[in-house]
Image (cartoon, rainbow, N blue to C red):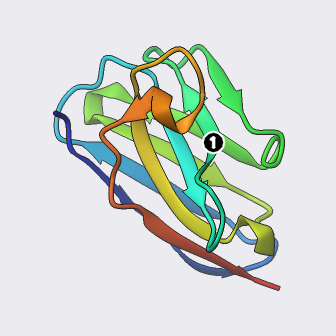
Amino acid sequence: QVQLVESGGGSVQAGGSLRLSCVASGPIYNSMGWFRQAPGKEREFVARISRSGSSRDIADSVKGRFTISRDNAKNTVYLQMNSLKPEDTAIYYCARRTGAGLGVTDFDSWGQGTQVTVSS
């Protein structure tokens, strides 16, 4: 099973930006996704990108602010987060898509996550 390692999280003020990276232990031939989980809440979908990068899905809550991309030569998926808000505070996870939907059960190989904290 592929191993995924996220990085790039941190603490920023509202309106700031961060770029998260997710490095895979080997080539990924699947769509990849980002999810987040805030304290006391369920893990929620953020973004998905196809293997070629030609197709993307973005959650309404982050549309226009977050962008997902990938570099298959580097086995890496990125999440560019701009205009961050306090409600974006969460642990962010990347995962490999194995199902047809965008729910948690449609993904596997979860990384350990990276913390993003946005202060007002």
Percent x, y of residue 41: 66, 64
Kind of residue sitting beneath label 1: Phe
What SS does tag 1 mark? Answer: strand
Mark 1, other Cα within 10 Å: few <14 / some 14–19 / many ≥20: many
In the rendered image, residue 23, in percent from the top left (x then y), is placed at 30, 46
Q: Relative to 82, does residue 106 appear above or below in the rendering?
A: above
Q: Is residue 90 left or right of residue 32?
A: right
Instruction: Look at the image and tell me in which quarter the N terminus lies.
Output: top left
> Could you tell me if residue 32 is visible in this image?
no
Q: Going 60% across and 28% down the picture, which residue do you hit?
A: 102
Against 32, residue 20 (above or below) is below
Q: Which image quadrant is residue 96 in?
A: top left
Q: Residue at x 78, y 49 (%)?
A: 65
Left-right relation of 53 to 82: left
For residue 19, say whether it is visible. yes
Residue under the point 59% across and 38% down = 68
Q: Is residue 103 above or below residue 41?
A: above
Image coords of residue 81 (percent x, y):
66, 55
- Quarter of the figure with the C terminus: bottom right
User: For the image shown, how many numbered marks are present on the structure?
Assistant: 1
Q: Which residue is mark 1?
A: 45
Residue 57, percent from left and from top? 68, 26
Q: Residue at x 52, y 59 (%)?
A: 92
Q: Nearer the viewer, residue 101 or 52?
A: 101
Quarter occupied by residue 25:
top left
